[in-house]
Amino acid sequence: MFTHHQQRDLRAPMPQRPSLRYAASAEHQAQVAAHLTARDRWLARVLAEHRVLTSPQIAAIAFGKSRRAANHRLHKLYTWRVLDRFQPYIGRGRAPMYYVLDTTGAHLLAHEDGIDPKDLKFRPERSVGIAYSLRLAHLMGVNSFFTALLSEALADTTQYQAVTEWWSEARCSRHFGDHVRPDGYGSWHEGGREIEWFLEWDTGSYQLSRFVAKLPGYTSLATTTHIVTPLLAVFATTAREAHARRHLAEHLRTHLRREKLPIATTSVEHLRTAGSPAHQVWLPLNHNDAGRYRLISLLSAWPYLDTPTSPMDSSGTDLGPVTRLSAPAPMPPWHHNELTWNPKR
């Protein structure tokens, strides 16, 4: 589930085999709309927001972990031009398919939101262009974090757990960019309690001083909004996490408003072993002797935190005139009673 490829390992995508695909005409889009399920529409909206997911990630969050059912439906959505796909070269083995939004999917979502598709200015070449982006490895790391949480919640048939917020870096930037630009924002519900956080995902490719330099922006945001939101930082290796914690501790010792920014860290290695960010992988700063915490148990490390409030309520940022699609619901619409899937549909 967790991806930690170095960017240099994700080389240019492999050439596609010839495949019959429909022209994205208005007539075709109208025909496709009648055949899309709630699952299809939710998946298209997730990809509009979070840009790219692999076929195993999609299987985990939308098909009850059934790879066969996922691949069957994804092929249809690709043929209909709801989604596009690419397969990068990797250093060893064979990469899964990576899926992005395509023209028909973008136009159908625009119609759902009452938007003229022309106003979206959607460009399919830009959507699939993430295949060549130098930030692909970073984006896949962030999305693997949230899809692992979502998969954990969907596997819990008691509805004891849920992902209640999942914001992309772009959405965070639009709301908080005057102060800081997190890699993501999330909120997790478990057993009647809820914790929210900003996420920073480290690929190991830049100096840690760059990460530390973002901390005053988080403090400034907390001061402006009067909402203290924890920062979760995931580092590429356990050794890098230990090194980063020394930098972070030194920064907080000299920072008078350190209570405005509770921080907990982990590594990709810990996440891969545990299988989910909800598990006992988090080490809060200044709590080294207590060992690692579960995600929801971080509330006991920071008892002064308020009840989570949607950042939409606290944002005073002008979002500007650009037309955007509505954000997807973090939990899929069928999660209460429809985790099975009929591949004939």
Image (tube, grey):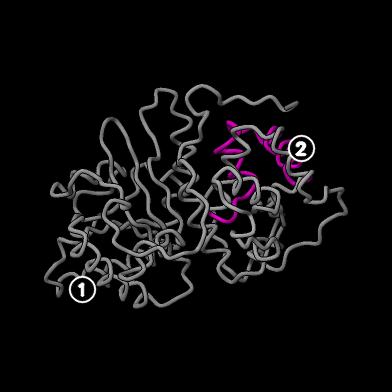
Answer few, some or many: residues within 10 Å of disc 1's Cα (few below 14, many 20 plus, some between 14 and 19).
few
Question: Which of the two residues, 289 or 208, is positioned nearer the viewer here?
Answer: 208
Q: Could you say whether the residue bearing mark 1 is in a helix, strand or loop?
A: helix
- Give the percent coordinates (x, y) of residue 41: 60, 39
Q: Is residue 194 magenta?
A: no
Q: Residues within 10 Å of mark 2 (few under 14, many from 20)?
A: few
Q: Magenta stretch?
A: 50-79
Task: Name the residue tied to disc 2.
Answer: 31
Residue 5 in the image: above or below residue 49: below
The three-letter code of the residue at mark 2 reads: Gln
Q: Is residue 55 magenta?
A: yes
- 67 or 275, nearer to the observer: 67
Q: Earlier in the sequence, mark 1 or mark 2?
A: 2
Q: Which residue was labeled with disc 1? A: 250
Vertical order, 104 against 119 (above or below): above
Residue type, mark 1 in image: Glu
Q: Where is residue 195 shown, x and y percent of the image? A: 28, 44
Q: Specify the quadrant of the image occupied by residue 221.
A: bottom left
